Amino acid sequence: METEEKKVYTIDDIARELGVSKTTVSRAISGKGRIGQATRERVLEFIEKHDYRPNVMAKGLAQKKTFNLALLLPKDYAVTEFPFFKDCMQGICEVASGHDYDVIISMIDGDDLSQIQRLEANRKVDGMILSRAVEHSMAQDYLKSCKEPFVVIGPEEDPQITYVDNKNLEASKELTSIMLMKGVQKLALLGGNQSFSVTESRYKGYLQAHKKAGRLVDADMIFMNCENQAKVSEAVKQALEQGADGILCMDDAICSMCIGSLRERKIPIPSQVRVASLYDSKSLEYNNPPITSVKFDTVRLGKMAAEKLLKMMGEETEEETQPLNYQVVLRESTQ
């Protein structure tokens, strides 16, 4: 038995069936422009009944848009960074799909601009989101020069660049202050890659907390570029030799490696050394003892990045005005 082929309606068909202009149909679908409420409802009722789907390709040609956004991920990201990027991606995709945009994922290898240049030259996307803010970024300089709409996730001091960021400086300052108030006399700081802007923000928070408490910062207690177990173990070793009774880690990956190093040395947490992290994860929450850390809403961070980018591109968005916040979760590791 043959089934009747379902008719695919175009805007022309809808306009002819309802006896209105194509402009009226377009306005009813987009929700933009002046149109009577009764007419709008007639059009929307018709397209729902006949399961009309806009031709995004034709719409793109008419508006000179691709209806694609690019999310640029660093090719050298660590496995431990994936949850952050995944949550950002979720927020970006939710907002993009709500405006009929698709998201293209592209991997960027350091200062190699070839992928970005190809996306821009071939007009494959209408805007880009850089998922990691880097000091002296060639990618950002290039996108500024070609006037491509883009947003950076992470702290950015250039007033010409639009960015979204968690309150990393404020969170670092608050958690450092808490540890100092709890009686930590020598607080070691284990930081990540110094070329990442977030590392600088967290470092500034650590310094500001010491200044606020009237405490001098011991430069020998600051360890940067702790990007693998060997470097973290060496930093922990040196910190303990200098009498550290507290260790603040810039992220959950560094903190996990720090905990492993302390266990190898049979150093109990928190009775001998208090430990905290400036980024939370399930592994820290369920560690024994559970680790004090900072919770951020990374999905919302991604949503705000997409909303800002769409607004730059001229789209009507309901951009959130509430600032991104964080929560310091006090657990057993700093008692």
Image: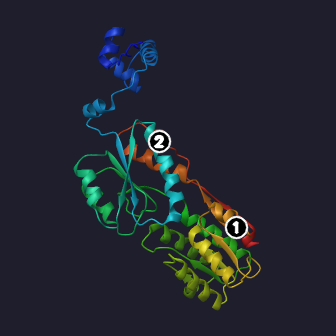
Q: Residue at x 54, y 70 (%)?
A: 202
Q: Mark 2 points at which residue?
A: 95
What number is the disc on residue 287? 1
Q: Where is residue 279 in the image (x, y as percent from the top left)?
A: 59, 64
Q: Position of residue 165 (x, y in %)?
A: 49, 58
Numbered disc in front, either 2 or 1:
1
Q: What element carries label 2?
A: helix
**In-front residue for pair 6/163:** 6
Quarter of the rendering containing residue 64 = top left
Residue 251 visible in the snapshot:
no
Q: Do the residues labelled 2 and 1 touch (CB within 8 Å)?
A: no
Specify the quadrant that holds the C terminus: bottom right
Is 234 situated above or below 51? below
Give the mark nearest the N terminus, 2 or 1.
2
Quarter of the rendering containing residue 236 = bottom right
Q: Distance between the residues labelled 2 and 1?
A: 34 Å
